[in-house]
Amino acid sequence: MASSNERLSISFETVGKQVLRVAHWRAETDVGKRPLLFFNGIGANLELSLVLGEMLPDRDILTFDVPGVGESPPPVFPYRPWQLARTARKLVDRFGFYNLDVMGVSWGGVMAQQFAIQYRKRVKRIILAATTTGVTMIPGRMTSISKMTDPRRYADPDFMRRNFETLYGDEMQGGADSHVAALKPPSTRGYLYQMLAFAGWSSLPFLRFLRQPTLVLAGERDRIVPMANAHILNFALPKSRLHIIKDGGHLFLVTRANETIPVIQDFLNEPYEVDLADIRRGVQTA
């Protein structure tokens, strides 16, 4: 069995005028499973998503450093969610993916919603982890949010370790230490543009149009995105289910990986229910 590192290739791709650092895990064997497009959290470089390769060895996975994050050069101008979604679509086209599943964590969960509504004929399943509906979210604790805006959480590993539980609600256990060690500070402009991207944006007006099976994941102790936000998503999405990670904080995908990964695997491996409306539109299904 090939390791996730053996299946991983990292490249720099020019999409329009933007250069992106891209990670692509190839499936161990081609058994016809849909590839997964993954959107990371705010300021998070792709090294923080390396668990994906171990989590889903039976499918292709694609993720990238958002402009100004990790090793992707910062953008020249601010961008809106629809623009980044279009960039991601051009990227998946380049890798030959048409039908795909999409997953996002925190800020990336908001991007996953945008991508799914913008290209809903191509997206078959959605996973939303520790995320919200945008500006209409229920805010987290001020003690956590204030530390989240402190740039030292990226540049100073000791600061992150000392404040890990206050920030995220997770204990320093499991893969938390390796997560901290893998952090790379985003550029000031890249981080600022990420925060500005969703100014005034909310998914509530269009969630009812997302009819794909959707898994909403939430940490019981998440201090940045309170669990009420997951209940809102679960209520508003027509084909949604909610799974709560007991005692999990904002980074449950890392600190509670042994509990979270099987839930994600089971959801993605369920037989796809063909939507008659898709057949009438001539949409391909996997």
Image: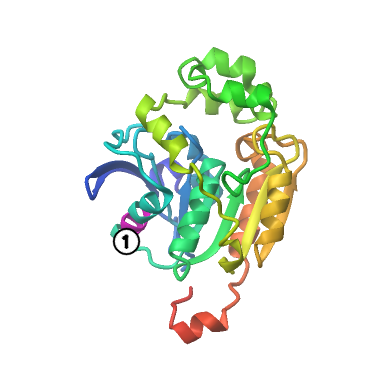
Q: Which of 104/208 is in front?
A: 208
> Overall secondary structure of the magenta stretch?
helix
Q: Tell me if residue 229 comes above or below residue 213 in the rendering.
A: above
Q: In the image, what residue type sits under mark 1?
A: Asp
Instruction: Identify whether 249 is placed above or below 60.
Output: above
> Please, which residue is most extreme toward the bottom here?
280
| Residue 207 at x, y percent in the picture | 59, 61
**Label 1 belongs to which residue?**
93
Looking at the image, which residue is at 32% across and 36% down?
72
The stretch drawn in magenta includes residue 91? yes
Horizontal relation, residue 179 to residue 20: left or right: right
User: Is 21 or 189 nearer to us in this picture?
Assistant: 189
Specify whether residue 212 is in view: no
- Please give left or right for residue 58 compared with residue 208 in the image: left
Measured from the top left, where is residue 244 in percent x and y?
74, 47
Q: Position of residue 210 (x, y in %)?
A: 57, 65
Please tell me which residue lies in front, 180 or 278.
278
Asked if residue 58 lies in the magenta stretch, the reply is no
Query: Can the viewer see residue 276 in this picture?
Result: yes
40 displayed left or right of 136: left
Question: Which residue is at a point 58% across and 60% down the rendered structure image?
Answer: 205
Q: Secondary structure at mark 1?
A: helix
Task: Estimate the x, y position of residue 234 in percent, counting from the top left.
Answer: 69, 57
Question: For the view shown, which residue lies furthest in the front direction?
Answer: 200
Q: Residue at x 44, y 78 (%)?
A: 283
Determine the image quadrant of residue 131: top right
Q: Write down the region rendered in magenta.
A: 88-92
Is residue 57 toward the left or the right of residue 221 in the image? Answer: left
